[in-house]
Amino acid sequence: MSSWRDNVRNVEPYTPGEQPKEEDVIKLNTNENPYPPSPKVMEAMENIRHLRKYPDPAATELVEAIAQYYGFTKEEVFVGVGSDDVLAVAFMTFFNGKKPVFFPDITYSFYPVWAELFQIPYEMKALDADFQIVPKDYYGANGGVIFPNPNAPTGAILSLEVIEDIILHNQDVVVIVDEAYIDFGGMSAKELTRKYDNVLVVQTYSKSRSLAGLRIGYAIGNQELIKAMNDVKYSYNSYTMNEPSIVMGKAVLEDEDYFQETRKKIIETREWFKEEMRELGFSFADSKANFIFASHKTVPAKELFEEAKKEKIYVRYFNKPRIDNYLRITIGTRKEMETLLAFFKRYIG
């Protein structure tokens, strides 16, 4: 007799960063913004009045606000429940060929999970010794290309010239640039979507906009790409965006001064923290994200991770090849980073 278990799809799931239940911790393990969202977000909550009804399936208010903010049309914007949802829809929509999709070997660890889940063939291309993409590795025949910029978890960034070189060698497939951390350094590839009809740029509210709890992500690309993604979205879940996300997601774009102020604080803290970490014997790529990916010359990363946790300081450790001696450390407030540095000084000696 056959078992229902024979028909279960078995996949190795994505492992998110630990979410400690205690309140009195320093949480530097999931790249959240240490500052609260714009006050305009809280004010906008008063306009949430229709929770008994289904939300607008097209999330029109939010789509139009994002389009206007960046100077695109609403037909060139797709929104979803965090950039994870946006990227998952993009995988389902664009990566359906028999050739493998290319992405880095050290990258956002959801990419291989989605590839396995949706049964998409893929090849991981090794980053070089400095954790940088090697463009020529992406010149071969493939079914699509995706990479984060700045990279996660290393923080290294590609120039627009390198990105465009990869696009030029892949004009018959969709190239996705995952820009979850672009607001903390570097130039966005959004303008390249006007020049190339096969380029999709994905961003999120979870990092620079301080709204990880609302789950808002979006993609910018030409109208044909966005329509294809919406067709897939409407085929499995029409109501992906809830009313609070639509209303508050629009409001946050109306406070540019606050956005620039908090973004600047994080960048300034990151640059100061880099210098302090170098003095303690850490090495790392020149991160342009809201984290650094650091290794100490004498003390193993796993040991530092475990000892910091005893002090209620949470950082991220990846027990994976090539990166099992690195810690990914989110940039928190200046006070939080001073506390972490004090721990390192005590422990490393």
Image (cartoon, rainbow, N blue to C red):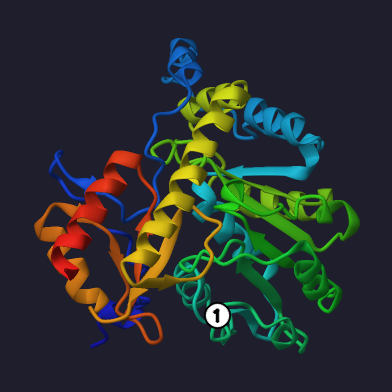
Based on the displayed image, in which of its 4 quarters is residue 279 positioned? Answer: bottom left
**Residue 304 visible in the shown view:** yes
Residue 212 screen position, x and y as percent: 42, 41
Which quadrant, please, contains the N terminus?
bottom left
From this view, report whether residue 22 is shown above or below residue 89.
Answer: above
In the picture, measured across the screen, residue 34 lies left or right of residue 241, that is left
In the picture, measured across the screen, residue 190 lies left or right of residue 230, that is right
Is residue 344 or residue 80 the one in the foreground? 344
**Residue 241 visible in the shown view:** no
Based on the displayed image, in which of its 4 quarters is residue 335 positioned? Answer: top left
Is residue 271 or residue 4 the one in the foreground? 271
* Residue appearing at x 35%, y 82% in the figure: 320
Q: Amino acid at mark 1?
A: Asp
* Residue appearing at x 81%, y 63% in the figure: 198
Residue labelled with disc 1: 130
Residue 225 screen position, x and y as percent: 77, 55
From this view, report whether residue 202 is shown above or below residue 59.
Answer: below
Residue placed furthest toward the right: 195
From this view, report whether residue 227 is shown above or below residue 104.
Answer: above
* Residue appearing at x 44%, y 50% in the figure: 272
Residue 276 screen position, x and y as percent: 37, 57
From this view, report whether residue 117 is shown above or below residue 236.
Answer: below
* Residue appearing at x 56%, y 67% in the figure: 156
Within-10-Å neighbours for mark 1: few <14, some 14–19, many 20+: few
Is residue 22 or residue 343 the one in the foreground? 343
Label 1 secondary element: loop
Residue 242 screen position, x and y as percent: 48, 32
